Amino acid sequence: MRAGVATALKDQLAIVIPIGPGDRGWRDLLPLLESLLPGVPRRLVFTHGDLQSRPRDPRERWTESRRGRARQQNAGASAFDCEWLWFLHADSRPDADTVAALAVFLASGQDALGYFDLRFARGGPALMRLTEFGAALRCRCFGLPFGDQGFLIRRERFYELGGFDESRPFGEDHALVWAARRSGLPLMRIPAALTTSARRYAQQGWWSTTLRHQWLTWKQALNEWRAP
């Protein structure tokens, strides 16, 4: 990436990375971000007591939070006063195309909740390509991107929406999308892929994982649609 673009992003953008208990995926993510987005501030948010997972590098900034991805992401966001927040999962793997599209999105001046196309890393079940297609269809037809698609939102808008709902044991990303829809904040696809791990599908099976996700997704969507 050109130095000028990286400098511009450094002045506008901060990255929040929630870390689950015992998670190690961030160890590969950090050097990748440093090469793609040098100088862009980032904060890793660990659960209380997860001492072994924390970075030993004093240059890395981290925050403690109670367990729960919503709490972690809210805690990370509160550490910044930049214009834009990028919520990135620890097993996400952006590439140069991801960052270039991100820069174009920010330069366009769009006031929207941005998200990327979902891609899965190699090594998962063969049907992961079908999962990618389903995610694209869900976004295009129903306007329901998920958090592993790398939500990008103005910090001001994030707080206007109330941040992530900490009362929810899961689906905090889904709830934020519905809050954006109710407020009239557009949802905007950023035309680049963001790769994530297919580990859960490999460990728990494609069919069982897919059916569970579909049940939870559409159950929550129905509840949100009925909400006043």
Image (cartoon, rainbow, N blue to C red):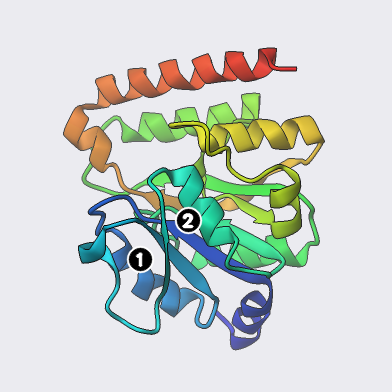
In the rendered image, is residue 125 in sight? no
Q: What residue type is labelled 2?
A: Leu
Q: Residue at x 40, y 52 (%)?
A: 195
**How far across and down, in percent of the image, does residue 62 sit?**
41, 69
For mark 2, give the secondary structure: loop
Q: Residue at x 26, y 20 (%)?
A: 208
Circles 1 and 2, Cβ within 8 Å, touching? The answer is yes
In the rendered image, is residue 211 in sight? yes
* Residue 179 location, quadrant: top right
Query: Which residue position holds label 2?
Result: 88
**How far across and down, in percent of the image, does residue 53 sit?**
25, 63
How busy is the neighbourhood of tag 2: few (under 14 within 10 Å), some, or many (20 plus)? many
Query: Which residue position holds label 1?
Result: 29
Label 1 or label 2, whichever comes before in sequence order: 1
> Which one is nearer the viewer's eye here, 137 or 151?
151
For mark 1, give the secondary structure: helix
> In which quadrant of the rendered image does the C terminus lie?
top right
> Which one is nearer the viewer's eye here, 128 or 209?
209
